[in-house]
Image: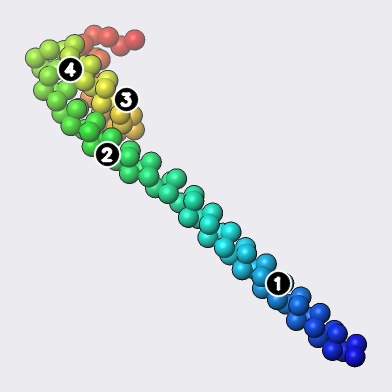
Amino acid sequence: MKYIQWQKNTRKGQEDKKDKAMNLKKLYLLCMIMIFPAFTFPAIAADSQCALAKKIGEKAAQKFKKDKTEGLKLFIKAHGLCPDDARLNFNLGLAYYKYGNLN
């Protein structure tokens, strides 16, 4: 009789372990579903902002030849949209240098 009771307890313990493992898997999956988009969507938005900044930077280069003040304003706007773009940083620095405002 004790052996049968022991088998029932063992089976119940194994089922509990399986349930806990399944719950952990569900929790992990839920966390990944919720966290993954938080990292991907800002990257997509940043890419579109950098594309817009590149267009503004190209306009700024053309505008700077005619009107330095307006060109510099456009470079600053482009830099605000995509501050990590090396080309925009270089052009902004060059525009400041040519404008004579290095502060």
Report if the CB atoms under discs 1 and 2 are less than 8 Å apart.
no
The amino acid type, in three-letter code, at marker 3 is Gly
Q: Which residue is mark 2?
A: 48
Query: Dot 3, how many residues are within 10 Å of its Cα: few (below 14), some (14-19), or many (20+)?
Result: some
Q: Is residue 4 left or right of residue 38?
A: right
Identify the mark nearer the N-term, 3 or 4: 4
The amino acid type, in three-letter code, at marker 2 is Ser
Which residue sits at x=25%, y=26%?
A: 78
Residue 80 - label:
3
Asked if residue 32 is positioned above or below residue 86 in the image, the reply reads below
Q: Is residue 89 visible?
A: no
Which residue sits at x=23%, y=24%?
A: 91
Q: Which residue is mark 4?
A: 71
Q: Is residue 79 visible?
A: yes
Which residue sits at x=71%, y=72%?
A: 17
Identify the mark nearer the N-term, 1 or 3: 1
Identify the mark nearer the N-term, 1 or 2: 1
- What separation in Å lies between label 1 and label 3 (alpha carbons)? 53 Å
The amino acid type, in three-letter code, at marker 1 is Lys
Q: Which residue is mark 1?
A: 17
Asked if residue 22 is positioned above or below residue 77 in the image, the reply reads below
- What separation in Å lies between label 2 and label 4 (alpha carbons)? 22 Å
Q: Position of residue 64 (x, y in %)?
A: 14, 17
- What separation in Å lies between label 3 and label 4 (alpha carbons)? 14 Å
Identify the mark nearer the N-term, 2 or 4: 2
Comparing 96 with 67, the one in front is: 67
Residue 87 - label:
none
Identify the mark nearer the N-term, 1 or 4: 1
